[in-house]
Amino acid sequence: MTEKIGVLFLHAQEEFGADAAVHADLMRYLDRDRFEVHLACTAGNGHEEPLPLRIMRAIPDLRIRPTQFVPWVGKRGLSELLKVGPALPAVPKDFWDLRRYVTANRIRIVHSTDRPRNAVYGVLLGKVTGAKSIVHVHVKWSNAYSRAARWGVQHADAIFSISQYVTSTVIDMGRAAADVYTVPNAIDATRWDPATDGASFRSEVGVPLDAPLLVSVSRLFSWKGQRELLQAFAVVRGEHPRTKLVIVGEDASGTDGGYVRELKALSNTLGVAEHVIFTGGRSDVARVMAACDVFTLPSFEEPFGLVFLEAMAMGKPVVAIANGGTPEVVEHGRSGLLSPAWDVPALAANISTLLRDPELRRSFGRHGRARVLEHFNAPRMARDAAQAYERVLGA
């Protein structure tokens, strides 16, 4: 019997973002007949078990090693370092214990995200154990990222990228094309049911059942296009005066809520404030999407757009921007409508086109869900990753 390939995933941060969700699906769906799957996950610095550890414990047949990673304070400085100071003595010992874990379990692949700690740990573990290091890039790659993250991407044995667009940015930054494997993102479609009741959400936020409803879900910062969406919404209401807009997400601009205040002020200036609902972050995104007629996120140079897959899996048409990785996900004229970046009139026209044509919305929704089920499902993503692992080991 062929020996299984040991793969160790690294997760050092205490938050559970889109990159963690993708890696969790990889860990869940990698073929256990071919792979033995391990996870070194942050043990946290407090008394409560970190959220990623709680979530990932639910993945079947996953060997988890809670790990004390070096604290990452970034730009927060000495005061933040002092808060985690008591945990620092455990870090060097835990790194060498993790090295022994890799060796003892015959792990051949160390798979990390592009976040600085993960990338550096993955490359260093590969160098001291002989395992192959893979850094999984989830963003448009550029010099804007930290020196540590760029070092990890430059020195890893191979790079995984989430879209052809991201692959091109990694190559432009100096990695050889032969070292970069495009593994398009995917979702577990079983978690997204178009039959989900959306009426209760409409009732909760005061939107009548027969009112046209737009929904936008993302972290809130300028490149996600919420300003342009509000401007387009004001235009759309000229033709569809009963339309409402729900914006879901937390302010991620680093301005202590200043971006949300700016958006609310803009809504007021545009005369649409009473028709725009800001919900903050929510855990029931499927329920929110079930309530809408059109999903829209005019995000500029989106690396991929998992949220588009989620909307498509819910059978919803998508309105977005024709750049970045978005056109690889949303097929213009089949599952949604795409317009040029920053073109507010074109964005508004696309939204209005869908609001006035229920059959077109249904057609786009059917095609979008079928596309997710056929092309953007988590088992396919895991198969792509498995093939890439074997190519890396063969190389």
Image (spheres, helix red, strand yellow):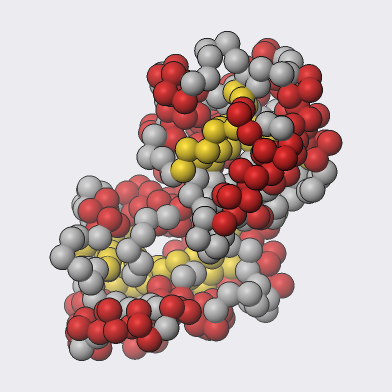
* Left or right position of 111 against 174: left
Give how far across and how far down residue 164 sits, in percent.
Answer: 66, 56
Q: What residue lies at 74% left-to-right and 50% top-to-bottom?
A: 323
Q: Taking 257 as reference, is 128 left or right? A: left
**Which residue sits at x=72%, y=15%?**
357
Q: Quadrant of the N terminus?
A: bottom left
The residue depicted at 38 percent of the width and 86 percent of the height is: 78
Q: Position of residue 341 (x, y in %)?
A: 78, 48
Give me the residue at 42% from left, 83% from top. Answer: 77
Q: Can residue 139 be seen in this snapshot?
A: yes
Corner quadrant of residue 111: bottom left
Q: Is residue 257 above or below residue 178?
A: above
Quadrant housing residue 293? top right
Q: Is residue 80 left or right of residue 384?
A: left
Q: Is residue 147 left or right of residue 360?
A: left
Q: Quadrant of residue 97?
A: bottom left
Q: Position of residue 70 (x, y in %)?
A: 31, 81
Residue 96 image position (x, y, % from top left):
24, 86
Residue closest to the far left:
47
> Measured along the vertical axis of the image, is residue 126 above or below residue 262?
below
